Image (cartoon, rainbow, N blue to C red):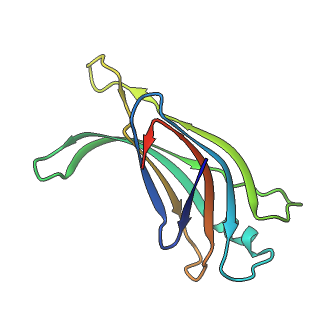
């Protein structure tokens, strides 16, 4: 298991998916802050959204600009129990790679990039960080 950090300075991370069997398992998320924040972390969690995006570049031009890509984006729910005191969320969220076809070609393709991102960051003064405990299979950073 390894740990990745997402915060306002580093709001996203991308992984390269190596096969149709690639997956990322997010075991848990720990909310940290430089300040003594007692119950402030629940306020932070309510204002931030964590999303995952699977992406495959279908076509790019000679200058390297992406002309066409296939995307599948979805939220990762950060739900807090009303009686929870510790700033750790047990997610056990499995993000599995998917296959698809392009046009009339029957050959199966798979997504090649997985991006995790913090979105809708409403509090620009916040110094909170999400520490995600993850497990990767057939994935490179």
Name the outermost residue toward the left.
Answer: 62
Answer with the quarter of the image where residue 38 lies.
Answer: bottom right
Q: Residue at x 26, y 19 (%)?
A: 105
Q: Note whether 106 is above or below 81 in the view shown.
A: above
Residue 29 point in image, percent of width and height: 67, 56
Residue 115 point in image, percent of width and height: 45, 50
Q: Residue at x 68, y 66 (%)?
A: 31
Q: Note whether 127 is above or below 7 in the view shown.
A: below
Q: Is residue 137 left or right of residue 45?
A: left
Residue 54 point in image, percent of width and height: 44, 42
Residue 135 point in image, percent of width and height: 58, 43
Question: Depth check: 12 or 22 in front?
Answer: 22
Q: Note whether 71 is above or below 30 in the view shown.
A: above
Q: Residue at x 30, y 19 (%)?
A: 107
Q: Residue at x 46, y 30 (%)?
A: 98
Name the outermost residue toward the top.
Answer: 106
Q: Is residue 65 left or right of residue 99?
A: left
């Amino acid at each position: 298991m390894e740990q990745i950090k997402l915060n306002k300075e580093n709001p996203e991370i991308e992984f390269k998916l190596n096969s149709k069997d690639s997956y990322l398992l997010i075991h848990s998320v720990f909310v940290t802050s430089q300040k003594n924040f007692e119950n402030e972390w629940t306020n932070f969690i309510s204002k931030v959204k964590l999303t995952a995006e699977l992406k495959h570049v279908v076509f790019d031009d000679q200058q390297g600009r992406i002309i066409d890509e296939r995307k599948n984006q979805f939220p990762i729910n950060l739900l807090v129990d009303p009686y929870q005191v510790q700033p750790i969320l047990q997610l056990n969220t499995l993000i599995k790679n998917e296959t698809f076809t392009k046009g009339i070609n029957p050959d199966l393709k798979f997504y090649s990039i997985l991006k995790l991102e913090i979105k809708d960051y409403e509090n620009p003064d916040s110094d909170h960080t999400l520490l995600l405990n993850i497990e990767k299979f057939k994935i490179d950073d």
